[in-house]
Image (spheres, rainbow, N blue to C red):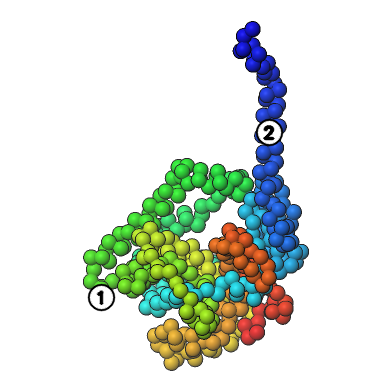
Amino acid sequence: MEVSGLLRLDVNGPMVTVALSVVLLALLKWYSTSAFSRLEKLGIRHPKPSPFIGNLTFFRQGFWESQMELRRLYGRLCGYYLGRRMFIVISEPDMIKQVLVENFSNFTNRMMMPLISQACDLLLAHLERYAESGDAFDIHRCYSCYSTDVVASVAFGTPVDSRNAPEHPFVRHCRRFFASSIPRPLLVLLLSFPSIMVPLARILPNKNRDELNGFFNNLIRNGIALRDRQAADERRRDFLQAVLDARCSAASLGVESFDIVTQVFSDECSANPAWEHQPRLPSRPLTVDEVVGQAVLFLIAGYEIVTNTLSFATYLLATHPDCQEKLLREVDRFTKTHVAPEYCSLQEGLPYLDMVIAETLRMYPPAFRFTREAAQDCELLGQRVPAGAVVEMAVGALHHDAEHWPHPEVFNPER
């Protein structure tokens, strides 16, 4: 009797196919929901997630409206899932302060005022022509050109008048940069299968992305090469030069030194003796790629924030003529005594303007949500936050909280 005959098994092809299909479906079902128990284990309320996409459909109206609804339904400490990723949302001031207050050194440079003033002069020249004609015009587009001019000059060392030169290479590439978007089906796939789709998206050819990356990379690298050949007193005093100076200084600054959000709380940190004696790891100098990244970050943040804030402030002043008149009187008094205003004189001499901008940012915050990732397990006012969890600061919800801002929908600069 042959041994092979004893071991031979009759394999039924359809049965194997069915068994493998059942296993595959079971694995897909497990994968689609396995990440959605973490918030419940932490005791954090959240909307019910859908398989694979989490709470993506909850945000179909946009993040602003949905964030308000999230807070209304689930409180100041809540959460949600985007794909498989967990977000812990906080809109409690003390909890937000606990997340953001860290001992990072300040990085300030106010030698860029002349460059910003040049862009302001261009903006005023365009606005004067419109005022003289008496015709209606798109103020948002004017502010968009102004923001482009400021970012080009300050961050990339490239003076430009984008209103009169719309086909300038920098202006053209900026338009392409902000016009590009991720198709919704691809976004769903990225959120549902991040471990597969993100690496795949990086290696797949993308002509538009590669051209934009190449343009901004070459612009910065050529600017660095030019400044390396110039004497110190010949170099433009702009953001790019400030980063290069920090990169070459004895006490080199790393990427963490450019954390703008953290700098808001820097005074509070320095006033706390416990922070002063806390050891800090030495910073690694910025690489050329990181310098490019800082300039592009300046473009992303500066363009949208400046354009939208100025547009909203103009709208609010137009709809509140009493506030507009009060601000105009303050500016008229200031210009009589300050022919060429400096940074400090602007802060001290225009308090009502500061109130108007602050109230505009409260009502229409440009960064109505931002995140931090927990490097290790910690507690926020008694709430456990595991390592790797993403903590989202719900700035928009906090700014419209009637407990802190009575009648939050009312524009009141003097509140």
Identified by mark 2, the residue type is Val
Disc 2 or disc 1, which is closer to the eye? 2
For residue 98, above or below residue 335: above
On the picture, is 268 further left or further right than 235? right
Which corner quadrant of the image does residue 339 belong to?
bottom left
Report the front residue among 209 and 272: 272
Q: Quadrant of residue 324?
A: bottom right
Residues tagged 2 and 1 counted as in contact (Cβ below 8 A): no
At 49% from the left edge and 85% from the top edge, which residue is drawn?
347
Q: Is residue 41 above or below residue 245?
A: above
Q: Earlier in the sequence, mark 2 or mark 1?
A: 2
Examine the rendering and report whether any part of residue 57 can be seen.
no
Q: Please, what secondary structure does the residue beneath circle 2 have?
A: helix
Residue found at x 42% / y 77%: 108
Q: Please state the horizontal and vertical placement of residue 391, each as a whole percent of the image.
A: 61, 64
Number of numbered discs on residues: 2
The residue beneath circle 2 is 23
Q: Which residue is mark 1?
A: 233
Q: Nearer the viewer, residue 158 or 203?
A: 203
Mark 2, Cα crowd under 10 Å, few <14 / some 14-19 / many 20+, is: few
Q: Is residue 345 left or right of residue 83?
A: left
User: Among all residues in the image, which is located at the extreme top?
Assistant: 1
**Quarter containing the C terminus:** bottom right
Q: Amino acid at mark 1?
A: Asp
Work out how far the residue at label 2 is from the one at label 1, CA to CA, in angstroms.
Answer: 70 Å
Label 1: state its secondary structure. helix
Quadrant in the picture for the N terminus: top right
Q: Is residue 51 visible?
A: yes
